[in-house]
Image: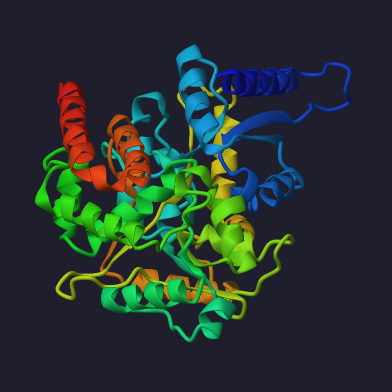
Amino acid sequence: MIRRLTVLACLFGALWVSGCDRAPDKTAASAPRTAVTFLHYFSDSLSGGMGELARTFNQMNSPYELKSVSLDHEAFKTSVQATLKAGNPPDLYSSWAGARTAALVDDLEPIDDIWQSAQLDTRFAPALVRSASQYQGKKYLIPLTQHYVAFFYNKKIFQANGVEPPQTWSAFLEVCATLKKKGVVPIALGAKDKWPAQFWFDLLLLRSAPLEFREKLMAGDARYDDPRVKAVFAEWAGLLSKGYFNASPAPNDLAWDSGANEMVYQGTAAMTLMGSWNIGFFSNDAHRWVGGKDFDFFAFPTMDGGLPVVSLGPIDGVVLPKRAANPAGAKAVMAYLSDMEAQQAISRGSGALAPNLLVPVDFYSPIQQRVREAVSKSPYFAFNYDLSTPPAVAELGLNAFSEFLAFPSAYPQILAKLSADAAARFQAAKP
């Protein structure tokens, strides 16, 4: 709690200073640029491209200066609520498309005017606009990145132990058994921040049950004690009981980046299930791995061949709060962020796909091109769990996943409680 208050104090201080920057300087020969404050969660291992983006914008002949403030994910979520409640939001927020943005719509300003003036329908695909940008019939979000969740693995470890990227679940289990027998941790999972565990729930469910069932579950029209959800946890518990995940440190004690990813990088673990921001992580200056040579990815294996393949991942974007102090400047930044060059800058730093349709395929690295191909070949793309269900319910789910990792055999009781608690929150949210 003390850390969060400190973060908020620093944030409010930064915004106050930015507000001072907006005051006209009567002694200057010309009017100073006015600040556009941007609060975002592109920080630490997920910061790729954002610094370059701000510098490039500020080098332009523009009457505005972009001032970005980055926070880690959990501090960001708290800060959004605190600044909106206090009535002093920044000019722009980053936002996860889906349920997180939907929950903020009443406090956001529609951007249909930007959409028309910048001709954004020529930059973004209609399906992406419907799923990520449009809420209650109006446009609210400029898409910045699209990520893809898959297994990222150490190629040297796979080759040294004679295993290949599996396409089916039975082949995946064989790979895990072989690696464990050879003394290598098959799967590194760093769930200290809770959200990384959700990908296992998501993809086990999407590979074993129809997408329509998952959509009902996310909307509160199906229950977490449904046999199909229990089957997911039974399968997941089986992987844990066989020792296919890291045991020391345990998943709940390990960070996804400095923990699980480093295990893969060091060769003590073979693979980890994570988003395509891992491309940026493994190829950064601290690691300098080459995609396709030192590390690679493969899609979550098929479990039921009768189900269509669903790709999973988040779409990040930027939104405009209603009470922004500099809405004109914020809209100028939003138009800039939708542009091809800006989206390429973010892609270079993060490993993400650029939502802008005008970004040419040959801009991407070979591994990014294969990620793009995997997404394009999937009939469906779904947002991950905490972006697909209302935040209050997602909090329950993430806590349940964490409890499950600590006590795998107790999943029937965990799901029973989650089912009751989620039903109560869905009921409370009804008008």
Task: Tell me the residue at 76%/18% (across/down).
Answer: 24
The picture places residue 55, in percent across and down from the top left corner, at 74, 47
| On screen, residue 11 above or below 350 | above
Task: Tell me the residue at 16%/30% (across/down).
Answer: 420
Instruction: Locate the N terminus and report the quarter of the image it occupies.
Output: top right
* Left or right for 369, reference 294: left
Q: Is residue 75 visible?
A: yes
Between 74 and 118, the residue placed more toward the observer is: 74
* Left or right for 68, reference 376: right
| On screen, residue 325 above or below 257 | above
Between 9 and 410, the residue placed more toward the observer is: 410
* Left or right for 234, reference 29: left
Based on the displayed image, in which of its 4 quarters is residue 112 positioned?
Answer: top left
The picture places residue 68, in percent across and down from the top left corner, at 66, 36
Between 48 and 207, the residue placed more toward the observer is: 207
* Left or right for 322, reference 209: right
| On screen, residue 310 above or below 169 | above
Between 30 and 78, the residue placed more toward the observer is: 78
The picture places residue 134, in percent across and down from the top left corner, at 33, 43
Q: Is residue 115 visible?
A: no
Task: Tell me the residue at 45%/24% (across/down).
Answer: 322
The picture places residue 135, in percent across and down from the top left corner, at 30, 39
